[in-house]
Amino acid sequence: MAASTVTRAADSDPGQNLELARLNFERSMIEVSLAPLKKHLTELASLERQRADAHDYSGAIEARDLRRRVENELERLDKDLLLLQSREQSLKANLLPDRIPLPLEAAELSGISRGNGTLTGWSRPGASAKWKLPALPAGGYEILLRYRCSPLEGGALIVQEARYSLAGEVETTLKGPQEKTLGTLKITDGSGPLTITARTLVKDNLMQLLAVELVPVSR
């Protein structure tokens, strides 16, 4: 399944690219330092117990004080990491385009067929189209569908990401293709799957799907 792509404003903004690179570097430096500090913390806790068992109380107190300093450092790094991650996610969100298309040709299909630039033949509940999201920052996204639906088509569907889902109805379109906002879906894994699944059908087909787009709700 081919992954869709997102063109961000950062592609033409060296300043934004530089800021993202700086944040990524600082985050990487913190992440690299965590494992040695955690190992050192474990070693100090063990040393503290050993000295206490040997009645070397001054040595145990020294090991305890060192352990507490390492704990404080880990707590500080954890807070710094959260701030960097929040700043990085916010910056990435601001750089997103107004609309993010999920190409129909990139979808992995189950019980659906491609034809004349549409996804059609949603002939049973459970028929689905699945995309791999293009490394989006976590957050809320409006789900926009563009589709055609004859009087004998329609029904209900559900859109799902890694943890959350959004239900919607597909109504008859009498004046040609229709664009509909299903609502806002919280996306927790911006590189994970997004799946549209038929829940109920009026008769033999849910719709003729022409396009799927995501619209960031916070910038």
Image (tube, rainbow, N blue to C red):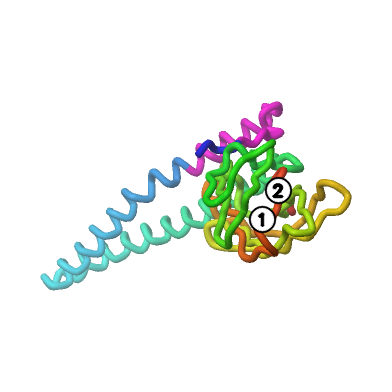
- Whether residue 17 appears in magenta in the rendering, the answer is yes
Front residue of 85/59: it is 85
Closer to the camera in the image, 178 or 164: 178
Q: CA distance from mark 2 to mark 1?
A: 8 Å
Image vertical order of residue 171 relative to residue 87, above or below: below
Identify the residue at image location x=71%, y=59%: 184
Residue 55, how many percent across, how many down? 13, 73
Q: Nearer the viewer, residue 147 or 63?
A: 147
Q: Position of residue 154 (x, y in %)?
A: 72, 60
Q: Is residue 46 above or below residue 212?
A: below
Q: Are the residues tagged 2 and 1 within 8 Å (C-beta)?
A: yes
Q: Is residue 39 visible?
A: yes
Q: Callout 1: helix, strand or loop?
A: loop
Per the image, is 108 magenta? Answer: no
Q: Main secondary structure of the magenta part?
A: helix
Q: Is residue 66 left or right of residue 3?
A: left
Residue 134's image quarter?
top right
- Name the residue located 67 percent from the left edge and 65 percent from the top edge: 167
Per the image, the residue denoted by label 2 is: 208
Name the residue at 61% across, 60% down.
198
Q: Quadrant of residue 13?
A: top right
Q: Is residue 103 above or below residue 82?
A: above
User: Which residues make up the magenta segment?
Assistant: 5-27
The circle drawn on residue 108 is none
**Residue carrying label 1:** 205
For numbered disc 2, what is the local secondary structure?
strand
Q: Residue at x 72, y 58 (%)?
A: 153
